[in-house]
Amino acid sequence: VSHDSKIILSASSDTTLRLWNAENGKCLMTLTGHKDIVQCCSFIPETNQVVSGSSDSTLRLWDRATGMSVHELKGHTGKVTCCSVSYDGSYIVSGSDDKTVKVWEVSSQLLLCSYTGHNETVSSCKISHKGNTVLSTAADGTLHFWDLLSAKNIRKYEVYSRLISHYSEVDGCFFVNQYAVTVSNEPTIKFWELTNPTTEPFCTIQNPHDQPIWCCALSPDRCTLLTGSTDMLLKIWSIPIQWRRKMLSDQDPEEDQSNWLELQDFNPQNVEEEEEVYE
């Protein structure tokens, strides 16, 4: 959805993208150019452009006004599975089934660096609000926390471990300040404090859906969490007030121990009681 909430961008297996009027649902424009399934897309803030990633191993930048492809970003050797844009529109990060996460500069269209560390397909990637760190998840069950431009792996989290006959792919993530949320095929929702050296989630909601969870998103006001699943349900979760304050704050946890303790004491059962379900 565009920053002003007036336009919706969608990607399709028919190799196209479409721009839609969010108010009346009419298709405004169809973007054609990819040679295979379009896996992901995003608006680029502070510009009139959008970005898309495809199974044809490329990303493309598009002009929203003309619908023309203005740049093709080549570097991945496998399907591009996810992409994300920094809040200031300066950088794009992309993930692929070539097991890498790559950082691109929007203004120059140059590939700045490539992260290697995942052992399987990268399923999601996000840039922090400050634009200095990247979060990525993969089918190998890990969550990686990276420095944006140096490609240094700050910390690795074993989100879901392999068992003899079972393992769960991590399908989605987002993060605000030092907190991250991941969702998976388990299905579970896990909450992480990224500066915590124990690399353990501080809260887990078990079986919030009956089937795998494929995506999650946070509302702009940080009050609600949205999850989507193959059980054909979208669920909206109310986020406790102490979490909202922390996610909107730039303070380090060491500088605010009282709020940090409240977060650790949070009972996920309180969230489930406030759950609303939309079919």
Image (cartoon, rainbow, N blue to C red):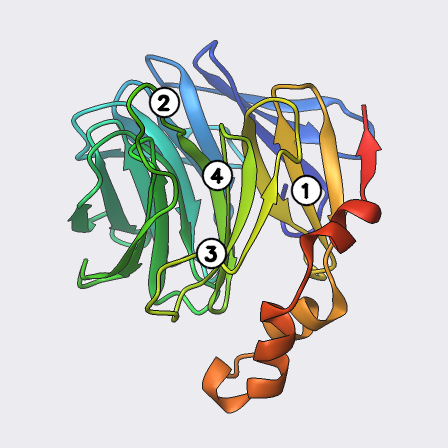
Label 2 sits on what residue type?
Answer: His
For the residues marked 1 and 2, what is the alpha-carbon distance in whole angstroms?
A: 26 Å
**Looking at the image, is mark 1 or mark 2 nearer the viewer?**
2
Residue nearer the viewer, 255 or 158: 158
Give the labeled residue for mark 2: 166
Tag 3: Cα neighbours inside 10 Å, few (<14), some, or many (≥20)?
A: some
Query: What's the residue at 42%, 21% (across, down)?
Result: 38
Can residue 248 be seen here? The reply is no
Give the labeled residue for mark 4: 172
First along the sequence among labels 4 and 2: 2
Cβ atoms at labels 4 and 1 below 8 Å apart: no
Residue 71 image point, x, y percent: 30, 36
Q: Is residue 223 left or right of residue 10?
A: right
First along the sequence among labels 1 and 2: 2
Count the marks: 4
Q: Please, what secondary structure does the residue beneath circle 4 have?
A: strand
Give the labeled residue for mark 1: 226
Label 1 sits on what residue type?
Answer: Leu
Query: What's the residue at 57%, 27% (across, down)?
Result: 10
First along the sequence among labels 4 and 1: 4
Residue 259 image point, x, y percent: 63, 81
**Looking at the image, is mark 1 or mark 3 nearer the viewer?**
3
First along the sequence among labels 1 and 3: 3
Q: Please, what secondary structure does the residue beneath circle 2 have?
A: loop
For the residues marked 3 and 2, what is the alpha-carbon distance in whole angstroms?
A: 20 Å
Residue nearer the viewer, 39 or 119: 119
Label 4 sits on what residue type?
Answer: Gly
First along the sequence among labels 3 and 4: 4
Q: Please, what secondary structure does the residue beneath circle 1 have?
A: strand
Q: Is residue 251 left or right of residue 236?
A: left
**Looking at the image, is mark 4 or mark 2 nearer the viewer?**
2
